[in-house]
Amino acid sequence: MKAIVQTGYGSPNVLELREIDAPPVNEEDVLVRVRAAGIHAGDYYAMMGAPYGVRFVVGFPKPKNYVPGYDLAGIVEETGSAVTRFQPGDEVFGACKGGCAELVSTAEEKLVSKPESVDYLQAGAVATSALAALHGLRDAGKVQPGMKVLINGASGGVGTFGVQIAKALGAEVTGVCSGRNVEMVSSIGADHVIDYTREDFTQNGQQYDLILDNATSRSFAEYKRALSPSGRVIPNSGNAGMGPVASAMIRSFYARQQGRPYYSSPKQDDLLTLRDMLETGKIRTIVDRTYALNETPEAMAYIGQGHAQGKVVIRVGD
């Protein structure tokens, strides 16, 4: 099968389209023929090998047959002997390892059926970013109806899902983004949108019950000015890097308004929640750009610029 293989650490030049063996299918696994694979900042950091600790996950001293991509949508090709929820021909989406390939083997519990109303490109970019938003808002942030929630970095992958999920949970939502993204963030349901190039949300006198920080663009002291007395800032660790994450973790033990960094792990119940939200129109995937499988290096370079509006998706197969 064709797959994008990472041969080292550094620029997108370390990504090559190669022929490799199809992955094994264990008894609880599902083999999926991939139609679309979302990529995100985590894939970019894995490619760069930064922070350095990433290399002990991806491969040390260099990657060995590492295929990027943690999200997919496609068609079930084969199922393991213990799989009960899916059969060949089913359309699915979810989480995986090695999504930038024609075939992916992933655990049954990391997949759900794809709604007919959602195409592969949209479904293939949901799992990682939407789960990060759901876990940050619903679980770490304990968002309740009527709360005032600010999403810092509202135009990126996690941010666009965050705006919509916070609205679905009944919050009054403010999105912070650059001027070129204001209209889009408003269109996905934000009650208020702040262009950070024109207005400093930590200086305008408004206060929020929760800030989901996808941008790590402010100090904790600055965030405190924008928090209600009982409010908290929750860092989305995916874009933060180890320094800010470690600082936030330490601070959370003594600063009441500092929420702890959270770990977002794919679970089928949460994927089913997202599936229902997609099917009912409570959330939709904002797809910025799509690239063919052999264009994955160009896609990764674009992500590295830090200006993607929503998600970047790799088209795989027909």
Image (cartoon, rainbow, N blue to C red):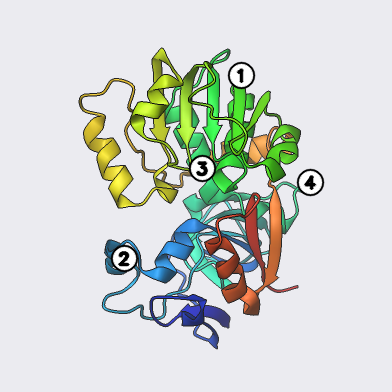
The residue that mark 4 highlights is: 117
Q: Secondary structure at mark 3?
A: helix
Q: Secondary structure at mark 1?
A: loop
Looking at the image, tell me whether mark 2 or mark 1 is earlier in sequence order: 2
Report which residue position mark 2 lands on. Answer: 57
Where residue 123 appears, x then y in whole percent?
66, 52
Mark 4 or 1: the one toward you: 1
Q: In which quadrant will I find the N terminus?
A: bottom right
Which mark is first along the chain, 4 or 3?
Answer: 4
Residue at (26% x, 23% y) in the render: 255
Residue matched to label 1: 170
Q: Alpha-carbon distance for marks 4 and 2?
A: 36 Å
Name the residue rendered at 54%, 66% in the picture. Answer: 99
Asked if one can make out residue 34 in the rendered structure from this viewpoint, the answer is yes
N-term-proximal mark, 4 vs 2: 2
Three-letter amino acid code of the residue under disc 2: Val
Crowd tier of the residue under label 3, counting other residues whose Cα lies within 10 Å: few below 14, some 14–19, many 20 or above: many
Q: How far is the residue under mark 2 from the one under mark 3?
A: 21 Å
Determine the image quadrant of residue 174: top right
Q: Position of residue 239 (x, y in %)?
A: 44, 50
Horizontal arrangement in the rendering, residue 196 relative to residue 143 (left or right): right
Q: Are marks 2 and 1 in contact (CB under 8 Å)?
A: no
